[in-house]
Image: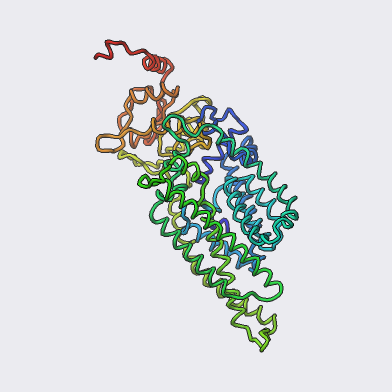
């Protein structure tokens, strides 16, 4: 089921971003001058483990091995969780598909829990394992699993840990200190595991947040990652989708609370499942706090307008956990509604309120209702999954390659752009120096994946430490493709390319021929005796760069100023 839901071509949307960085972690000679790869590494555990595999294996193989490992972990964790709430194996499969579809269509901030291989592909199964023990009430196992999730991805594990901690505190508020003493050792273990992820992540925040007029957190929240971090900049359809999902969660939760558990073991499972739903509701509270911060401090019409402070708060992804937890809560709550409906319908009470029906008969009827719940879920989920997969199969392009597969300019060639892209990157990997630095087209994110060479800047590859974010912003604005008087993309002039080459000491230039109709007056290296109508490679010799740098650094005379 996981393969059906999540399998796509390699590289996935974030695999071309994180796996080259993991490779650079173990092999500093891989793209040694790249801004992103040489920046601070906030996902230490992912780079340390996946990066070790990249020393001997191609990136695509590492991606598939990582996917299979993460998906197997999720399958195991999900099976454990659904058994705890009373599902049999085939209902577990349906519930997983329901969770995936609800997340895919109902997310608010673009978060997902099942996809390509990266840090959160391991963190989310760890959270699911923790939720299994939340349902069982075995809290001593909850904290180590949450700590393990934080070790892989501090934001994913951190928000899940906060939600779980709030529910635990509420349950034990009357005897808090005695309960805390009983959890001390597991909490210490979980904290030690969490520090593996927290310490590297905090290291990226150590440099100044502001440099001149540029604020790193504002670059992240209001510019590069606004679709994840700033609700006022979310697409309108995302607000409607999230509102619909929350209404469904509220409805299913209210119906669940009106139900009654089956007796004995099912009563314990019911209580634990309600506890899990409560954890999911705390994620909504966290998201609402983030929404309030954005509403009060990001609006320049209000006296509370403080964008620098707001961005430093919002940069921690306040809406990520609710994107995953609310669909999970819907699945669990609707399952409990179906189970309780079966129990209620099969209840015959005597004058004392005791159920006179045999427990086995009540269980059997509840199972029948579970079957009908499953049938209804199958119909809805099949429609959702079918639509998702139909879209993927029609694209026939790996997610990370979709951007480059579509020509951004008006001069598209009648050839397969992706084939041309892989061809030019292969030529670069085989012919360009390993330490070469490249000016690359903006509308792509897989240059390092295929070519293995450094880029001056890449839109996708935004660093995570303050200093590098500020430098990334400068470069992305400086290297923004030029436009004509009508606002249309146009090709670079020779002088513009020489200025960029001199500024960043980048001798190699890769241009997109759908934009660059007239070639610059530079030495062409590719294509020569090769048919590639989509991309071309130009070279700037060191003398040209030195001359341009000298001209830029030359003092301006009084005569020149007067002129």
Up/down of 18 relative to 540, above or below: below
Query: Which image quadrant: the N terminus?
Result: bottom right
Q: What's the residue at 60%, 45% (across, down)?
A: 154
How many numbered marks, from 0 up? 0
Up/down of 386 relative to 225, above or below: below
Visible in this render: residue 80? no
Q: Residue furthest bottom?
A: 351
Q: What's the residue at 33%, 35% (across, down)?
A: 515
Q: Percent from the top left, x then y, of residue 519?
A: 33, 28
Looking at this view, is 171 or 320 the one in front?
171
On screen, residue 527 versus residue 62, left or right, reads: left
Q: Percent from the top left, x then y, of residue 390?
A: 45, 58
Which colour scheme appears in the figure?
A: rainbow
Q: What's the residue at 63%, 57% (across, down)?
A: 75
Q: Percent from the top left, x then y, of residue 483?
A: 30, 34
On screen, residue 128 versus residue 404, left or right, reads: right
Looking at this view, is 334 or 286 the one in front?
286
Visible in this render: residue 384? yes
Query: Which image quadrant: the C terminus?
Result: top left
On screen, residue 180 versus residue 322, left or right, reads: right
């Amino acid at each position: 089921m996981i393969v059906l839901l999540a399998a796509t071509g390699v590289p996935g949307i974030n695999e071309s971003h994180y796996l080259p960085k993991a490779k650079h972690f173990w092999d500093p000679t891989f793209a040694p001058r790249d801004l992103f790869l040489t920046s601070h590494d906030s996902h230490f555990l992912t780079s340390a483990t996946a990066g070790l595999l990249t020393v001997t294996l191609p990136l695509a193989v590492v991606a598939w091995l990582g996917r299979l490992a993460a998906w197997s972990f999720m399958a195991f964790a999900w099976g454990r969780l659904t058994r705890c709430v009373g599902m049999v194996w085939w209902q577990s499969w349906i519930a997983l598909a329901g969770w995936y579809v609800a997340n895919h269509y109902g997310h608010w901030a673009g978060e997902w829990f099942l996809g390509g291989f990266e840090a959160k592909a391991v963190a989310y199964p760890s959270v699911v394992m923790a939720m299994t023990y939340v349902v069982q009430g075995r809290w001593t196992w909850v904290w180590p699993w949450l700590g393990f999730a934080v070790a892989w991805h501090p934001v994913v594990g951190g928000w899940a840990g906060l939600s779980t901690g709030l529910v635990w505190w509420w349950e034990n508020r009357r005897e808090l200190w005695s309960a805390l003493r009983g959890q001390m050792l597991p909490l210490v273990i979980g904290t030690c595991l969490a520090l593996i992820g927290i310490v590297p992540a905090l290291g990226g925040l150590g440099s100044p947040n502001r440099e001149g007029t540029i604020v790193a957190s504002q670059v992240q929240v209001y510019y590069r990652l606004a679709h994840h971090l700033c609700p006022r900049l979310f697409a309108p359809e995302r607000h409607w989708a999230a509102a619909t999902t929350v209404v469904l969660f509220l409805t299913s939760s209210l119906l669940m609370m009106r139900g009654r558990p089956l007796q004995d073991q099912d009563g314990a499972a019911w209580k634990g499942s309600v506890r899990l739903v409560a954890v999911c509701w705390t994620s909504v509270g966290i998201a609402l706090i983030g929404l309030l911060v954005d509403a009060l401090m990001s609006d320049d019409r209000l006296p509370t307008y403080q964008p620098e402070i707001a961005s430093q708060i919002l940069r921690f992804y306040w809406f990520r956990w609710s994107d995953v937890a609310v669909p999970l809560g819907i699945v669990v709550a609707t399952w409990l509604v179906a189970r309780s409906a079966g129990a209620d319908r099969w209840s015959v009470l005597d004058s004392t309120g005791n159920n006179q029906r045999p427990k086995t008969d009540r269980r059997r009827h509840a199972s029948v209702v579970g079957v009908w719940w499953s049938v209804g879920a199958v119909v809805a989920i099949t429609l959702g999954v079918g639509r998702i997969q139909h879209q993927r199969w029609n694209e026939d392009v790996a997610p990370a390659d979709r951007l480059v597969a579509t020509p951004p300019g008006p001069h598209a060639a009648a050839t397969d752009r992706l084939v041309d892209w892989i061809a030019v990157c292969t030529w670069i990997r085989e012919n360009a120096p390993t330490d070469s630095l490249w000016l690359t087209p903006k509308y792509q994110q897989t240059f390092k994946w295929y070519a293995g060479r450094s880029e001056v800047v890449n839109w996708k590859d935004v660093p995570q430490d303050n200093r590098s974010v500020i430098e990334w912003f400068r470069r992305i604005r400086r290297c923004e493709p030029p436009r004509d008087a009508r606002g249309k993309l146009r090709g670079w002039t020779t002088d513009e390319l020489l200025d960029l080459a001199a500024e960043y000491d980048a001798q190699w230039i890769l241009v997109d021929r759908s934009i660059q109709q007239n070639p610059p007056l530079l030495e062409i290296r590719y294509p020569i005796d090769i048919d590639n109508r989509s991309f071309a490679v130009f070279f700037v010799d060191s003398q040209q760069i030195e001359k341009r740098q000298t001209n830029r650094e030359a003092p301006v005379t009084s005569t020149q100023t007067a002129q």
